[in-house]
Structures are given as structure tokens and as C-alpha cells.
Amino acid sequence: MTIRPYQPSDLPAMTAIWNEVVEEGVAFPQLETLDEASGERFFAAQTHTAVAVDDAGAVRGLYILHPNNVGRCGHIANASFAVSSLCRGQRLGEALAKDCLRQARACGFTLMQFNAVVESNVHARHLYERLGFQPLGAIPGGFRMKDGRYETICLYYHTL
């Protein structure tokens, strides 16, 4: 896999992968999926958007990097990661997260904060902790799952 900045030709695959995670309803807070136009605007609006492509050039995952807040908190980054269900369990999320941390530093961020890691998303939580993210706490009932029940969200930060 190669991780690189996205190109306009990647947008259909990126949107499909993003929408897959949104539709699963267990990790991303978004309810609405992206179409071609909204996907193009969404990914272009990020500080940095990167894709993971296989040897054939097919997009298999992506991340978005952006400020967690504005102004006096604008030095804190936030990111989201999406991996195609066809490629999960192959450490692609780890490669994306490591690249994202490097890009965050290069973009001038000094911290990264994750606001809403769903407690049952144990693979993501273990990955973040393995990469040095520190848990900040938990918010019981902070995430509404697709089936309507509420689950705890965990907050993390990483010094860059």
C-alpha cells in the first residue's frame, strides 16, 4: 500500500469508502452520506486528505486531517480514518494513522485530539493506544448507534 495525497480521480472510491463507514453507523457521527458534489467539497475542505492505494492503484482507505477547533485551540488537530471493509484487519488503519501524525506535525499542529471514539470500537482504541494516544476520559451515552442505543465515547490526545 502507498499513502499519498488524494487526487480528484480518487473521489468516487473515497466517497464510497466514507459512505460505507457512515452507513454502518457504529463509528462516525455523520448521518448523511456524501454524493459526488458534497464529497468533492468535503474532502477539499480538510487541511489534508490522504488515501491508501494498493499496487493496482485502487483506493482502499483514507483519512482526513483538520483543526479540532478554531482560534486559540486551532493548534489541536482532529482526524478521521476510513478503511474499506474488504481491507480491514490488514493494518491499513495503522499505516494511515502514522502518516496522519506525520502530516499533522508538518501542517503545524502540536496536538491531536479524538473526541468520539466509540467504546466498542476496540480495534481503533487499541491502535490509538499503541501509537501513544492518551485516554482523556469517557462520556457515557455520547454516541447513538445505528440501532438507536447509546454507547460511551472515549476521548484521546497525542502530543505531536
Image (cartoon, grey):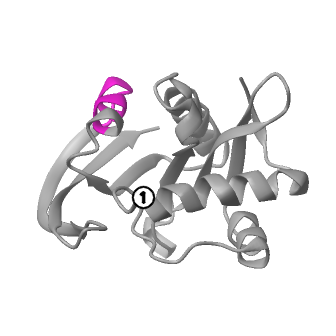
- Residue kind at label 1, given as amino acid type: Glu
Quarter of the image for residue 64 reads bottom right
- Please name whichever residue, 97 or 134, is drawn nearer the observer in this view of the structure: 97
Quarter of the image for residue 3 reads top right
For the N terminus, which image quadrant? top right
What residue is pinned by disc 1?
24
Residue 108 x, y percent position in the rendering: 61, 49
Main secondary-structure element of the magenta-colored stretch: helix
Verify whether residue 131 appears in magenta: yes
Q: Secondary structure at mark 1?
A: helix
Q: Is residue 65 visible?
A: no
Verify whether residue 79 appears in magenta: no
Q: Is residue 66 left or right of residue 127?
A: right
Which residue appears at 37% of the width and 56% of the height? Answer: 27
- The range drawn in magenta is 125-133
Whether 70 is drawn above or below 11: the answer is: below
Report how many numbered discs are placed on residues in the image.
1
Label 1 crowd (10 A; few <14 / some 14-19 / many >=20) = few
Which residue appears at 32% of the width and 33% of the height? Answer: 123
Q: Is residue 126 left or right of residue 56?
A: left
- Please name whichever residue, 40 or 48, is drawn nearer the observer in this view of the structure: 40
Q: Extreme left residue here?
A: 140
